[in-house]
Image (cartoon, coloured by chain):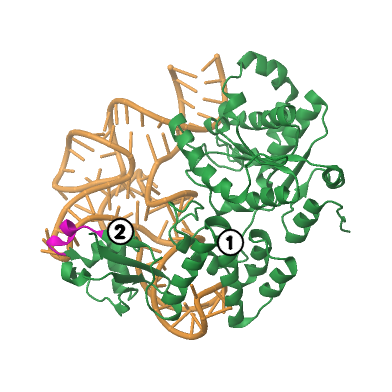
Chain colours: A green, B orange
Amino acid sequence: MTYHPKSDFMRVMMERGYLADCTDYQGLDEALSAGMVTAYIGYDATAKSLHVGHLLNVMMLRWFQKCGHKPITLMGGGTTKVGDPSFRSDERPLLGPDQIAENIEGMKQVFAKYLTYEKGENGALMLDNAEWLDGLNYLEFLRDIGRHFSVNRMLSFESVKSRLDREQSLSFLEFNYMILQAYDFLELNRRYSCVLQMGGSDQWGNIVNGIDLTRRVLDAEIFGLTSPLLTTSDGRKMGKSAGGAVWLNSDMLSPYEFWQFWRNTTDADVGRFLKLYTELPVEECERLGALGGAEINEAKAVLANEVTALCHGREAAEAAQATAREVFEKGGAGDDLPTVELSRDEVAGGISIVQVLVRSGLAKSGKEAKRLISDNGARMGDEALTDPGLMLDAGALQSPVKLSAGKKRHALVKLAE
RNA sequence: GGGUCGGUGGCAGAGUCCGGCUAAUUGCACCUGACUGUAAAUCAGGCGGGGAAACCCACGGUGGUUCAAAUCCAUCCCGGCCCA
């Protein structure tokens, strides 16, 4: 039997497939319908940009704000110094303060696209847990907070079990991560009356800890809600493209490549992804997702357009689509293709096609480029390349040249001015 | 600090006792080709790096033994587990 939510937010979450679990559906639903609620999601600063794996949660915050509530994006400036061990088989390398600060700056760019941080009753807040974690006094913290945690219980969490079962060492530093995250929730409740933490289902244990702690210390009623860990329908983890991670920052992955990632969604995922990553009406998502045969390609383009528009703007989405049409439907080239400029110096004495393939990003190494050529996968201006020894000179690059690796990956090479 | 096991290609994990046939078995991931719809499934091939090529480099680091070392020896670094 399904619970019928009263609040807009819960209704959206359920309809669109964002919900994996909630500590108290009814209690949360009632709080949400009673008035404005504040919720947070924490992000560790482990990279310069968010990637598609984070996008689901960002969308949740966006809906949350749209429904009239107040979202907090919490940057893990403090917790990143510790490193979340959840479901990890080994310790992650520790980042320095400079790197963390840089990463936070990079991630902020994306949030601004999805959330409204302006003032206003439900304007989003951007916080950093370094604010309260950096200055903690160890003994005080242990006595006030540490005493509420049972080591026995922490050891029983699924998130660290695999680590212990494999007899991989779990350092005390990492072990404290969950305590710090729990403490975040407590602080956010105290400072901002934040009563809800959301996150991926891998964060369940951490979230529950925060709720327990806050309940004990402040006697507050607060909630946790998790989203499913998404896998594509062919069982792969969401978020790898040909080149690697699918970043949300445009300086890490161009809008065109981002668009391509969505355009290449597996048939079976189209409907689900439309509901999760776009704001089209549910019925529309379902209709598009149900298209059969080649028709579903239209739906994929819609998906790519909508997601790209949210992340990079409508204009960038249209430009990406225009290039895609040009490249895939007309067999031409487009401005939005990844472009590499070669300097005149580089080309002066002639440059091997293998080098050019590497420079263009179509091959990771010279060996790979040669393999590509011998596999018949490399093309220049749509002509198959057969000679790995081919040299190009400035004349050959007079006008931009399209290089292709396989059917989908294309790049432009031109001479720098 | 003591004992013990281990450090191999993106990951996992063989090989190490009995040195050469090992750029290195196998699985996953990944890439290309065919079929298609820029899909999935399937089938086929590939899958360390540099170099235009000849050829050169590798099994934690460094030395050594040997005609020849991932494989033997020495030493150093790093990690796991157990004991203090």
Residue A177, located in which quarter of the rendered image?
top right
Q: Which residue is labeled 1 in the image?
A: A307
- Is residue A247 inside the magenta stretch? no
Residue A24, located in which quarter of the rendered image?
top right
Using the image, determine if residue A336 lies above or below residue A195.
below
Q: Residue at x 19, y 72 (%)?
A: A396
> Residue A63: x and y, percent?
70, 52
- Is residue A346 inside the magenta stretch? yes
> Residue A196: x and y, percent?
75, 39
Q: Is residue A393 at all visible to an observer of this figure?
A: no
Q: Earlier in the sequence, mark 1 or mark 2?
A: 1
Q: Which residue is labeled 2 in the image?
A: A365
Q: Residue at x 70, y 32 (%)?
A: A185
Name the residue nearer the viewer: A82 or A319: A319
For label 2, the crowd category at 10 Å Cα-Cα, with few meaning under 14, some 14 to 19 and many 20 or more, is: some
Q: Chain of mark 1?
A: A
Bounds of the magenta segment: A342-350
Using the image, determine if residue A408 lies above or below residue A253.
below
Q: CA distance from mark 1 to mark 2?
A: 32 Å
Which image quarter is the C terminus of chain A in?
bottom left
